[in-house]
Image: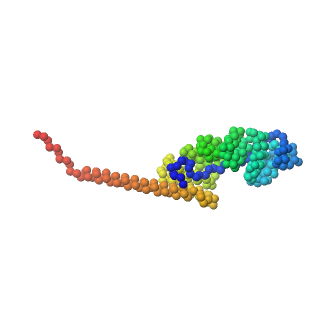
């Protein structure tokens, strides 16, 4: 494990999960495309009627994780209007979750061609880029999503996560602060904000953000993990001494372990960090004890010197010259 004197983000620590997919769009856009209809095999018998109800049903199925059913329902909507972007968004997101990334990409690109100012599409394109480990393209896509839809909280959240990965903490703070304003009940948004503050050594602000995450999700083991690492990595924590700081870290990491339970992996670093904190406490206690003994020795010597000076006979008066 790296030294405690290493850079602020040298440790392994939990990052907040990237936000979910599939926003809500309600506009009906354009007319149909036979080539597209053939590609995704949309039904023809319902063409011309309102696609919104089927799309709403598809979105509900998507939110429940019933992706195959969501795709079928989306196709019913697209049978009514092959260029209906909300249905394309649900379908593309569903294929993404089924790990059919090429098909998801194709549908997302088609949707973007119809509506180039749709934030949900760029948000999905960002996720698709991450499947290729292309963080540059992902960051650009999430940023574009925030530009075309400034009030789209998940895109700001995802952008903050990418900035955290690249250690652009100023950008991460700006994006995460937007995310918490737009998604005030999101524990994940506050997790990212706390991580960004931590990167800038703003320990008090980071502490407050992680605790706001816990206010919104009291079972968040990752929030406790990050609090533990926050206290471990701070060379000095405002208002408390080193022993108290390390004890806070131990308590938070133990709570993390309790909540994570069976999810803990063999290579989880929590026990190593707890042991490290205990060693730091032991070193500090020995240092304090040595200092105390030195102070006692100094005080004893000063007292002995004072007693010796008090016991000495007065000096004889100097002989006067005649």
- How is the model colour-coded? rainbow
Which quadrant of the figure contains the N terminus? Answer: bottom right
Judged left or right of residue 42, residue 252 is left
Quarter of the rendering containing residue 182? top right
Can residue 180 be seen in the rendering of this structure?
no
Image spot of residue 33 (x, y percent): 84, 42
Q: Look at 72% across and 45% down and name the residue there.
A: 125
Vertical position of residue 274 compared to residue 79: above or below:
below
Which quadrant of the figure contains the C terminus? Answer: top left
Image spot of residue 37 (x, y percent): 84, 46
Image spot of residue 236 (x, y percent): 49, 48
Query: Residue lying farthest right?
Result: 45
Q: Look at 59% across and 56% down and name the residue there.
A: 256
Can residue 165 be seen in the rendering of this structure?
yes
Q: Nearer the viewer, residue 95 or 311?
A: 95
Query: Residue lying farthest left?
Result: 322
Vertical position of residue 242 compared to residue 149: above or below:
below
Q: Look at 72% across and 42% down and name the residue there.
A: 119
Q: Look at 36% across and 54% down and name the residue there.
A: 296
Image spot of residue 247 (x, y percent): 51, 55
Total marks placed: 0
Judged left or right of residue 65, residue 190 is left
Q: Nearer the viewer, residue 188 or 97?
A: 97
Judged left or right of residue 206, residue 86 is right
């Amino acid at each position: 494990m790296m030294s405690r004197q290493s850079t602020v983000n040298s440790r392994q620590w939990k990052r907040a999960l990237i936000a979910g997919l599939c926003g809500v769009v309600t506009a009906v856009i354009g007319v149909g495309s036979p080539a597209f209809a053939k590609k995704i095999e949309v039904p023809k018998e319902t063409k011309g009627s309102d696609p919104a109800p089927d799309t709403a049903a598809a979105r509900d199925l998507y939110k429940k994780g019933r992706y195959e059913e969501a795709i079928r329902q989306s196709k019913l909507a697209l049978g009514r209007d092959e260029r209906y972007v909300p249905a394309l968004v649900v379908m593309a997101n569903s294929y993404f979750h089924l790990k059919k990334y090429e098909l998801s990409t194709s549908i997302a690109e088609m949707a973007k061609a119809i509506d180039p100012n749709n934030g949900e599409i760029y948000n999905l394109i960002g996720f698709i880029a991450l499947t290729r480990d292309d963080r540059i393209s992902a960051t650009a896509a999430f940023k574009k999503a925030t530009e075309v839809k400034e009030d789209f909280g998940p895109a700001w959240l995802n952008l903050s996560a990418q900035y955290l990965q690249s250690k652009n903490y100023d950008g991460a703070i700006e994006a995460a602060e937007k995310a918490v304003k737009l998604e005030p009940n999101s524990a994940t948004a506050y997790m990212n904000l706390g991580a960004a503050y931590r990167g800038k050594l703003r320990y008090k602000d980071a502490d407050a953000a992680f605790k706001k995450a816990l206010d919104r999700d009291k079972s968040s083991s990752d929030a406790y993990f990050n609090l533990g690492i926050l206290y471990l990595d701070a060379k000095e924590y405002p208002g408390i001494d080193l022993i108290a700081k390390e004890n806070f870290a131990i308590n938070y990491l133990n709570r993390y372990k309790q909540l994570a339970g069976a999810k803990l992996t063999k290579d989880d670093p929590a026990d190593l960090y707890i042991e490290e904190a205990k060693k730091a406490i032991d070193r500090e206690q020995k240092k304090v004890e040595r200092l105390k003994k030195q102070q006692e020795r100094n005080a004893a010597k000063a007292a002995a010197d004072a007693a010796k000076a008090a016991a000495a006979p007065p000096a004889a008066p100097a002989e006067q010259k005649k």
